Amino acid sequence: MNRLNRVRESIATIVSGVARRLPTSTSSRWVRGFAWASLVSQTLIVGTGGAVRLTGSGLGCPTWPRCTEDSFVATPEMGLHGLVEFGTRRLTFVLGIIAIAAFASILRLRRERPELLRLTVALGLGIPAQAVIGGITVLTGLNPWVVGLHFVISTVLVALATVYVHRVYRGPRAPLAVVGRDRALAFATAVGAWITVLVGIVVTGSGPHAGDGGAARNGLDSELLQHVHSWPAYVTFALTVLLVALAVQLGMPRLRRAAIALLAIELVQIAVGLTQANLGLPELLVGIHMVLACVLIAAVTLVLLEQRQPAGVIATTADATAAELVR
């Protein structure tokens, strides 16, 4: 009994010591570092998932959760396809470690910043959810609609990670600095961006890159869908141009920078999309297009977030505008 008590006391001492070392401010390099790690890793895993599809390795591990019926790891006989699929599955554990570290880094801030705790929990729960959807993808023989759902959840997690990074740096949710038609413009831009990405996922499900030679396609007209995919993309681009002009007019530098970043990403994404369509969908460009879709979602999420500014900043801007009108 005495030995058991000593073990308990030792564990309690270790836990207490670790707890005392946890950050107490969002300016901590650990809090900010793990926030960025969450965003970057959620984006990069889309790239590795794209590599699985584009190399035809979607069924490199033909079952789940094991890689084969008898092994959790890829065997030499499975070749490159097995290695690529197994490597991507292992990255899920890296994301899990980052999520746990991000959660631990804000534990001592949970009372004053409860939204950070909720965001880290949501990001953490998204990882096993993605693993299960990935397993269903394999067990259904790479059904294109399940594969598409897999990508949709990834974009949602990228958006959540963007919110988390923003909250860490900018603080709790601030009052809106734009209202009415101004707010509607930013919202319409975000809707356009999401529609563009969602239609792009359906386009991919109809195209040649199925992840495996025997995998089914969704049966839709790929060439027609490529044109349909471009329509919301161009509308979103036009709305973003208007949003940049609006941010300049309102004198909101944060919103202006976010909108310009979104505009630049859209330009690159449009260029990549047109090039890959004209070159017959080469694997490398398709993979870049997939990763840029997540970057696009991060940028449009930032635009929505930067519509909010601290009340003092809004008041200062309003006073300056009123003074200008008087003059």
Image: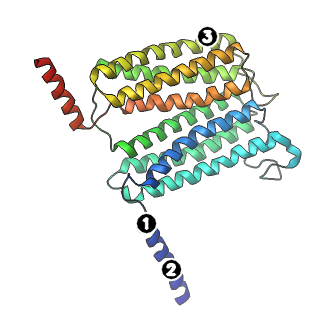
The amino acid pointed to by label 3 is His
Residue placed under numbered mark 2 in the picture: 10
Label 2 element class? helix
Quarter containing the C terminus: top left
Which residue is pictured at 74% across the width and 38% down the height?
139
Closer to the camera in the image, 47 or 249: 249
Closer to the camera in the image, 173 or 255: 255
Q: Residue furthest left?
A: 326
The picture quadrant where one finds residue 317 is top left
* Residue 261 sits above or below residue 139 on the image: above
The amino acid pointed to by label 1 is Arg
The location of residue 31, given as percent across then percent down, is 44, 53
Question: Is residue 194 visible to us here?
Answer: no
Residue placed under numbered mark 1 in the picture: 21
The amino acid pointed to by label 2 is Ser
The location of residue 165, given as percent across then percent down, is 44, 43
Which residue is pictured at 43% across the width and 20% down the height?
189
Label 3 element class? helix
